[in-house]
Amino acid sequence: MPLAKLYLTDLRTRMRGLKTLGEGAMQQLGDNDWHTALAEEGNSAAVLVQHLSGNMHSRWAALRSGYREGQDGESAGRNRDAEFEERTLSAPELWTLWNAGWAAFLDAIDHLSPADLMRPLTIRGEAHTVLEACQRQVAHYSGHVYQLILLTKTLRGTGWQTLSVARGQSAAFNAAMFSKEERQKPT
C-alpha cells in the first residue's frame, strides 16, 4: 500500500478512535459535571466541546466534499474566544455540538485522496500542506480529548470506568491478546 494511502487509512481509524475515547468520558459525566472546571482558569467539559466543535467546523467544514484550493482553515465567521466562554448549554446540546464538529472533520478527511496530502492549505494565512494541517489537528484534538478524559476521571473519582486496560490487568489483557493472535493464525 502506498505510504499516503496508508497514512490516510491510519488517520481515519485513529481519529475515530479518539472520538470514541472522548465519548466514553462524556458518557460518564453527570448533569452537574459538564460545566465544572478543575481550576479557576480551567476548561469545563462544555467549553472543551464548544472549542473542539468550533475548531473542526472552522478548519474542515469547507472541505467536507473534498479538497478545494484556496480554502483557509479559519472561517471568517468563527468567534474562537466565544468557544471558551462558559454557556448554559445542556448535555443534549453539547452532544449535538460534539457530533456536528466531528462530522465536519471526519467527512473532510474521508474525502481526502493521497494526492491531496501535498497540496497547499492555509490556516489563519499560514501555509501548510494538507498533511501538515492534518498532523496539526491530530495533536490539537488529542490534547483536548485527553483533557476531557482527565477532567472526567477526576470528577468521577472512584466511580470512573476505565476506557483502557484497567490497573492491575495488563498481564491478563496481554495474555488474551496473544491467545487471540494464536487462534487467528492459519493452521
Image (cartoon, rainbow, N blue to C red):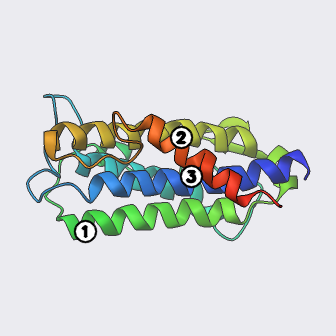
Relative vertical location of residue 91 with respect to residue 47 in this rendering, above or below:
below
Q: Position of residue 83 (x, y in %)?
A: 31, 48
Give how far apart the Cα atoms at labels 1 and 2 are. 39 Å
Residue 73 appears anywhere in the view: no
* 167 sits to left or right of 37: right
Mark 3, residues whose alpha carbon is within 10 Å: few (<14), some, or many (≥20)?
A: some
Relative vertical location of residue 77 with respect to residue 121 in this rendering, above or below:
below
Residue 116 appears anywhere in the view: yes
* 72 sits to left or right of 20: right
Tell me the amino acid under the disc marked 3.
Met
* 172 sits to left or right of 4: left
Q: Which of labels 3 and 1 is toward the front?
A: 3
The quarter in which the C terminus is drawn is bottom right
Residue linked to disc 2: 174
* 127 sits to left or right of 25: right
Mark 3 and mark 1 in contact? Answer it, CB < 8 Å. no
> What element does badge 1 sit on?
helix
Mark 2 and mark 3 in contact? Answer it, CB < 8 Å. no
Q: Residue at x 27, y 62 (%)?
A: 94
Lower sequence index among marks 3 and 1: 3
Give how far apart the Cα atoms at labels 3 and 1 are. 22 Å
In the picture, the disc for residue 93 is 1
Give how far apart the Cα atoms at labels 2 and 3 are. 24 Å
